[in-house]
Structure formats: C-alpha cells, structure tokens
Amino acid sequence: MAPNITTSPAANDCPAKNPEEEPIQKVQEYKLQIVWRNVLLFAYLHLAAVYGAYLMIFEAKWFTVAWTILLYYTSALGITAGAHRLWSHRAYKARLPLKILLAFCNTISFQNHIFEWARDHRVHHKFSETDADPHDARRGFFFSHVGWLLCRKHPNVKEKGKVIDLSDLYADSVVMFQKRHYLILMPLACFIMPTMVPMYFWNETFLCSWFVATMFRYAFVLNMTWLVNSAAHMWGNKPYDMTINPSENLGVALGAAGEGWHNYHHVFPWDYKAAELGNYRANFTTGFIDFMSRIGMAYDLKTVPKEVIDKRCARTGDGTRQLWGWGDKDLTKEEINDAVIVDHFKTN
Ligand code: ST9
Ligand code: ZN
Ligand code: ZN
C-alpha cells in the first residue's frame, strides 16, 4: 500500500514578508498511518506469550522447556549469524550447507525473510537515526522497539533504501529461495513444527506446545532482537564513537546472543564478531561462527586490527573502552598506580 504522504508549504512556521514574491517550496510531510492488523496480531502474541510463561513455569514438561530453549538459540543464530552478520554485513562467507542451516534457523525466527531483513538493516546502518532509518531511535523507545512494525514506513526509508546495493542478495540462491517460498516455509518453521514436535515426541498438550514453545518463544526472541534497536540505541557506554547513540550494552548482549555491543558495531559493521572482543559468554554468535570456521563451513572472517580501533577510540571515543582485566594494555598508568592491592596473608 502506498505511504500516506501529504504536501504542505515549507514556510508554514515563519510568516513570509511578501508571499507573492516568495516561491512556495513543497516538502513531503510524513503522516503516521497505523496498521491495525499488526497492532492486533502483536497484542495477541504478547498476551499469549504471558500465558505461555505461566504454563512454562507451572504445567509444561521439562522436555518442552528444553525444546523452547533450543528453539531460542537456533532461531537467534538464524538472525545473528545469518540475516545479520552474514547476509546484511557480509562480515564472513559461508559454504552452502551452513547457508541452508542458517536460512532454516532464520525461518524459525519469523522476522520477515532474509532479503527484507537485510535490506532494512543496511538502510538502518547507512542512514542511522534519520527519517530514512526504519526504526529511527530518535522517535523514542517504543517506536524503535516495536512501534515501527505497527505503522507504514516513512517515505524516506523507501526512497533512500533504493540507493542501497542489494545485488549480492539477489545473486544468493538460498536467500532468493527463502524469499520465493516464505509464505509456505515460515508458518511451517515458526509455528507448526515447534508446536507439533512436543505433541508427537513426548505427548505434550496442545496448550503447552502452542503457548510455550511457539508463542512465548517467538515473542521472547522478537523482544530480545528489538532491544538492540531500542535499549542499545539509548543506554550504555560509547568507547568507539561518542557522537552516535548506539551503545555498548551488556544486558542486551547476553539476551541477544552477542549483539549488544552496538557502539562498536555501528563503527565497524563489517567485523564478524560485532564487538571488539570475542568473549563467547557475552557473544554466543561469535563462538558459533568460530566453530563453523574451524570445521571449514565459514571462511573469510573479517575483523578490525587493534591499531585501527585504538586510533578510532582516541579520536572519537568517550574514554570508557572495555578492559578484559588486570594487565589489559588499555589500563592507564593512573589506574595502575591508584589500584588497591590487598594481600590478607602478608598483612596479618
Ligand atoms: C521483525 C523484524 O521483528 C525485526 C528486525 C530487527 C532488526 C534488529 C537489528 C539489530 C541488529 C541485529 C541484532 C539481532 C539480535 C537477535 C537476537 C536474538 C535473540 N528499502 O515494508 P513495506 C519498499 S519482523 C527500499 O510493506 P509499508 C519496497 O518496494 C516481525 N525499499 O512498507 C517494498 O515492497 P517489496 C514479523 C523499501 O507499507 C514496499 O516499500 N513481521 C524498504 O510502509 C513496501 O514495503 C511483521 O510483523 C527499504 N528498507 O509497511 C511484518 N522498505 O518488499 C511487519 C520498504 O515488495 N511489517 N521498501 O520490495 C509490515 O507489516 C510492514 O513492513 C509495515 C510497513 C507495516 C511495518
Ligand atoms: Zn548491523
Ligand atoms: Zn543499530
């Protein structure tokens, strides 16, 4: 459906001295157009997810809980290692079996097909926090979290989106296959398969299968993903570039399989780690890609040399660069001199 665009004189706010002399400039004004179908569907999903959380604690079988956790990790990887680091940013290359695995996991996550996800995400990076950013965080937490999926896009998103190169995605047979068959594959992978497996293999009830493994799991993965657009664009340190809003957010990194190191990621989006350090606990996805690289399924992993990062931090960082601990090269002399070192055995 066409976006709702209205035109109005640009000089509306400041009265013209002589309107006849001044050419009337036309500007495109964006009018919010809510998509009520999406509002209703997301309202149902979130209510169902709350009921699912209740069932998970009080009724579901342990196997169903384990299945839900497995689906969380697999669908997360379909987004993080797949749609995000591989297909949006081309931060590494994957052999065909890995691509197929990631596309399957991605379909479980139902966040639109890879092509649409990567197109929106490239636009997000290229025009971050402008009208052309699909989830422009300047419009507040709610809009960048989920509100952008509840209304028509700003016309600038579509306009600027046209200049983004998508030739690699068009040339990728796995991406195109998923796009072509998405309306069949997505319901099967995201809703039917996750519900049927517990019922068939361990006699779980339909209620627990649907509300726990499907509704709760889907809503949970969505919200963890959306937090990268909302929370990680608002709260956290900015060691790499303090002039932008994306921030380093440990909480988001833990919930989003390593995608919370968002200040670094916006500065160096081609780094396959999407972070400076490859700590696997707070970056599960990097562990997965490293493993895939060891078995020959992932290759050409791109990362940024330390000297380049150092220079960038010195030039634009806010001075809060992360340290791994005592002995880190970035510890300052003052921090080392001022540190209190306690040795109870010696002092007693
Ligand atoms: C979902 C996506 O949740 C979440 C993405 C999050 C991204 C996070 C990134 C953070 C980093 C990674 C962290 C990962 C962490 C993972 C952790 C896991 C634990 N450029 O869209 P339409 C044109 S989806 C160029 O309909 P409307 C194009 O021609 C949830 N052109 O616009 C297009 O036609 P076509 C489930 C563009 O009408 C046409 O416009 N899905 C661009 O304004 C129409 O496009 C839903 O709920 C562009 N960027 O509608 C569906 N965009 O596609 C929700 C558009 O044929 N979406 N065009 O080429 C919708 O219903 C609609 O898109 C809408 C806008 C109502 C939001
Ligand atoms: Zn990104
Ligand atoms: Zn971002």
Image: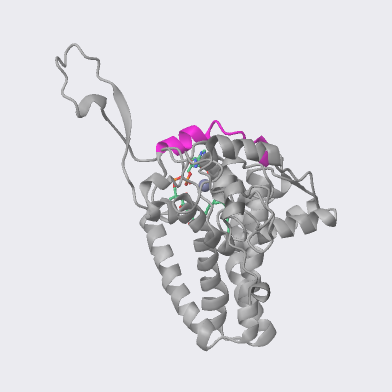
The range drawn in magenta is: 155-170
Residue 79 in the image: state x and y as whole percent.
62, 56
Looking at the picture, how far across and down is residue 246, in whole percent?
50, 47
Magenta span main SS: helix
Q: Is residue 6 magenta?
A: no
* Total marks placed: 0
Colour scheme of this structure image? Answer: one colour
Residue 291 is drawn in which quadrant?
A: bottom right
Q: Is residue 56 toward the left or the right of residue 155 in the image?
A: right
Q: Please, is residue 164 above or below residue 266 in the view?
A: above
- Any part of residue 159 in sight: yes
At x 62%, y 41%, the residue is 268
Q: Nearer the viewer, residue 179 or 17?
A: 17
Give percent across and percent down for residue 265. Answer: 59, 46
- Which quadrant would residue 230 be assigned to in this image? bottom left
Q: Is 167 within the magenta?
A: yes
Q: Is residue 185 visible?
A: no
137 or 86, nearer to the observer:
137
Q: Position of residue 33 (x, y in %)?
A: 33, 47
Q: Kindly identify the residue that appears in the image at 64 percent across and 74 percent down.
A: 344
Q: Foreground residue, 271 or 333?
A: 333
Quadrant of image for the C terminus: bottom right
Location of the N terminus by quadrant is top left
Vertical comparison of 135 with 218: above or below: above
Residue at the top extreme, as displayed: 21
